[in-house]
Amino acid sequence: MSRSINPELDLTISRLIRAPRSLVWNAWTDPSSFEQWWIPEPARCKVTEMELRPGGAFVTQISENGGDFQPHLSGCFLAVEDGERIVFTNALVGGWRPAEQPFMTAIITLQDHPDGTDYAAHVMHKSNADRNMHEEMGFYDGWGTVIGQLAKLVERRVQ
């Protein structure tokens, strides 16, 4: 399903990952694998909730510089289409409850490619100010880094 991108509100990033789509999907949906790539190193990630169903909670924590784990993402899955697409938002938390500070909705799509998997993230914001703030916070560096970490994790499994 193609989505129209609104450059005033959206940020997108994509990458070819040289591994089968099933491996990429498993790295996204298995909490212990997900923790290995979701946050730029050397920070660490802990998944506290990952209910892979519409309305399911999606909660991660971050530890920077070896410190205590702190809140990172508290969101809700909107759609989970096995092997193909994950949609999540921090506008809602588990059980469809409204979040205090909604910021973004992300659509992650995986498509077969002759050399592996086309991985794409389409991140939508409620305002141009939020979109620009996310870009200035380092969207391309941060999301690019974690997609690179995901690629490294799954490409290693192919060899």
Image: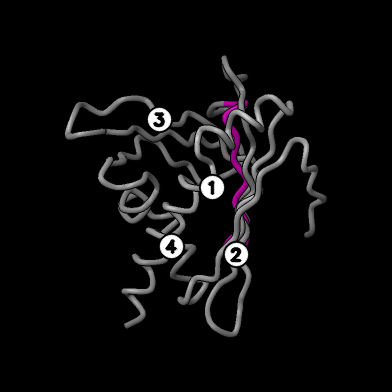
Q: Which residues are magenta?
A: 82-92
Residue hosting label 4: 26
**Which comes sooner in the sequence, label 3 or label 2?**
3
Amino acid type for the residue under numbered disc 1: Tyr
Dot 1: element: helix
Which numbered disc covers residue 15? none
The residue lying at 78 percent from left, 36 percent from top is 8
Residue hosting label 3: 72
Q: CA distance from mark 2 to mark 1?
A: 19 Å
Tell me the crowding category of disc 1: few under 14, some 14 to 19, or many 20 or more residues within 10 angstroms, Cα based.
some
Dot 3: element: strand
- Between disc 4 and disc 1, the foreground one is 1
Q: Is residue 156 left or right of residue 106?
A: left
Is there a contact, CB below 8 Å, between mark 1 and mark 3? no
Q: CA distance from mark 4 to mark 1?
A: 24 Å
Q: Is residue 76 left or right of residue 64?
A: right
Q: Residue 129 location in percent, x, y?
A: 69, 24
- Report if residue 86 lies within the magenta region: yes
Q: With respect to residue 78, does 17 lie above or below?
A: below
